[in-house]
Amino acid sequence: MSESCLFCKIIEGKIPSVKVYEDEKTFAFKDINPQAPVHIVIVPKKHIASLAEADCGDEEILGAVQVAASKISKMFDETKQSFRLVNNCGADAGQTVFHIHYHLLGGRQFGWPPG
């Protein structure tokens, strides 16, 4: 955990959130500025600044995030059939909190290309 990281503080319960899922390796909560009817932020409990900083020892944690996304998608009627899972890696890609995280979005139609 990083003492200055917003998401680490949310995981630790120091900053309130609306938790929707938690397991040994991951924590998920509702986004405070939702971009879709369902917008959940999924984070590994281990602090990794970005996907670019993940290393070969992080495969299990990153896999756990994918499995958590699948489980969370089944919790909401709007995401049972389709959803988008997004990771912004680095400031130029839109990452604003430097703790790797994924946005699970659903409940509306999305266009392509994104951004």
Image (cartoon, rainbow, N blue to C red):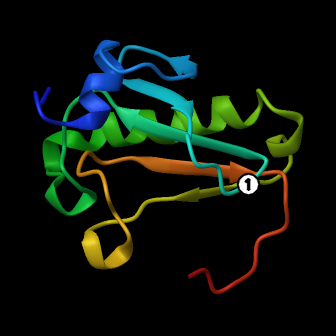
Instruction: Please state the horizontal and vertical placement of residue 63, each as a whole percent of the image.
Output: 41, 40
Query: Where 59 sits versus 23, above or below?
Result: below
Q: What residue is at 50 percent from the left and 42 percent from the top?
A: 66
Q: Residues within 10 Å of mark 1 (few under 14, many from 20)?
A: some
Where is residue 68? Give x, y as percent.
Answer: 54, 31
Q: Which of 88 and 53 is in front in this view?
A: 88
Apparent side of residue 84 relative to residue 110 in the rendered image (left or right): left
Amino acid bearing label 1? Ala
**Circle 1 sits on which residue?**
36
Left or right, residue 6 beside residue 87: left
Determine whether the residue tagged by mark 1 lies in a helix, strand or loop. loop
Give the answer, above or below, for where 72 lies relative to 79: above
| Relative to 55, residue 27 above or below | above
Q: Position of residue 26 (x, y in %)?
A: 40, 26
Q: How many labels does the image show?
A: 1
What residue is drawn where x is 39% and y is 47%? Answer: 101
